[in-house]
Amino acid sequence: PSLSLPLIIGTLILVVTFLSPEAGLYVLVFSMLLGPEFIVGGMGTGTTLGRGVTLRFDDLLLLLVGFGWLARTAISEDAGRFVRTPLNRAIMLYTAACVFATLMGMLLGHVRHSGGFFFLLKYYEYFFLFFMTVNIVTTEKQIKRLLVASLVTFTLVSLYCLAQIPSGQRVSAPFEGVDGEPNTLGGYLVFMMAVVAGLLLTPGATTKKLPLLALLGLGGMVLQATLSRASFLSAIVVVVAVLDLARRRSPTLLGILLLSLIVFVIAMPNSVVDRMMYTFTQPKESGQIEMGGIRIDTSTSERLHSWQEALDVFWRSPLWGAGVTGGPFMDAMYPRVLTETGLLGISAFFYLLWRLFQMGLTAYHSGDDPFVRGLALGFLLGLLGLVVHAIGANSFIIVRIMEPFWLFTALLVKAYILKVAPEGSDAYALGDDMDARRLSSTGAGTRMPLPLGFKRGSIPGS
């Protein structure tokens, strides 16, 4: 029974996905934060605490859904025809850099074969999710339904974490093990709250403002209970960006936001203030860094030491690094990429971040649809928050942050495609050349302007 039941469930999911790939996406959306995990191998005790290869229920679901989608694509009329996006080149360069660095690490004995292989698979399952979503989604209604499903998942996770607050412990997402991962939950909350804020700040993007405001407040309470300083820092940067945006649009809106922020700060629990002050008030212990007579707590000191350690490892192999899992464990994204993939990998990683920002800006400034603009603004705010969050966490390789992130990336790309390339018109295709010229529209009968990063072509099935 222990074997036959999973086989039956897996077969059922495979059949459902083959018949309706969109249904498989909904299953994935709800499993991203609500699926259990289990550790494979003896290299650690969790994704952020060690080198353990952590498999989650959604990893297996993604395998089944992806196989069903590929099987359906293979027998369809559009077999082999996929939507091109401006992120393709950046994704492939980063993938190639990590694979090359890991192969070199294996050859030189820095990387265990099984660990490096499975970590690479987990790194790139998000990219597969991105490509699969872009190709499965074909209508704006599907995009909005997937957005609603993601927000429902966000609500369920927040309510689950809200119930943990009376315990006095730091909250974490469901099925995070005994210790939990509050920092991971914090990064997810910041990104999802940024998406909600983008929809609220864009006039006409949504008519359901009251539920989104309530969700924003719920997420804010749960974020405080994580006591994650990296998440607090990223949230502060997002709030500053929102205030600057409000200042440019409406003084009244800025006043409302400032008043809400003041009330929020006044009502902030003492535990949050103590957690932030703990950075400088921890009793003297070994391993602390002192700067100008001020002691830094051991956790922050360890992250600062990791940057120095990253430079030491980097100089041993500056070009391609030690390979994925080949260097020492670091709970900070940028030194980790530097040690594992060297100059090749860190350059490809920053290039990918730049393309993501550029894609979001293109969708925000070039589109005239309020929903697309709201989704683009939320995506940009969320990406900004994750870039800051990655200073103190491995944000861009954590599954529970990256799966929602790449899902929304795909939804934004496809939403823009559908708006600028309606069926039966002279369509636009998202191309790999972000330096394509803008064309101007000067009168009736001329074609609409070509946004940065888009080139003329056709999009099958759009």
Image (spheres, grey):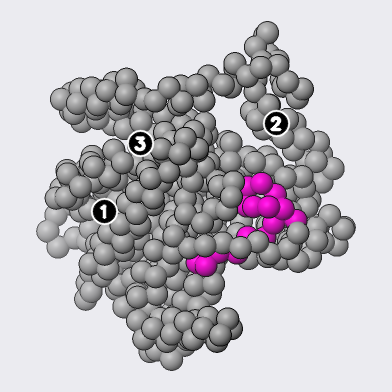
3D distance between C-alphas at marks 3 and 1: 28 Å
Residue 385 on the magenta span: no
Magenta includes 49?
A: yes
Q: CA distance from mark 1 to mark 2?
A: 41 Å
Quadrant placement of the C terminus: bottom left
Is residue 84 rendered to the left or right of residue 112?
A: left
Q: Position of residue 189 (x, y in %)?
A: 41, 44
- Under circle 1, the secondary element is helix
Residue 98 drawn at (x, y percent):
68, 57
Residue 211 appears in the figure: yes
Describe the element under mark 3 as helix, strand or loop. helix
Q: Which mark is residue 183?
A: none
For marks 3 and 1 on the same chain, the one whose residue lies earlier in the sequence: 3
Q: Is residue 290 above or below residue 267?
A: above
Instruction: Farthest residue to the top: give it.
Output: 293
Q: Tell me which amino acid carries mark 1.
A: Val
The residue under the point 75% across, 24% down is 287
Q: List the residue tagged with mark 2.
A: 302
Give the extent of the magenta segment: 43-58
Amino acid of disc 2: Glu
- Choose the circle earlier in sequence order: 3 or 2: 3
Q: Which amino acid, mark 3?
A: Met
Whether residue 439 is visible, yes or no, is no
Most frequent secondary structure within the magenta stretch: loop
User: What residue did someone put label 1 on?
Assistant: 372
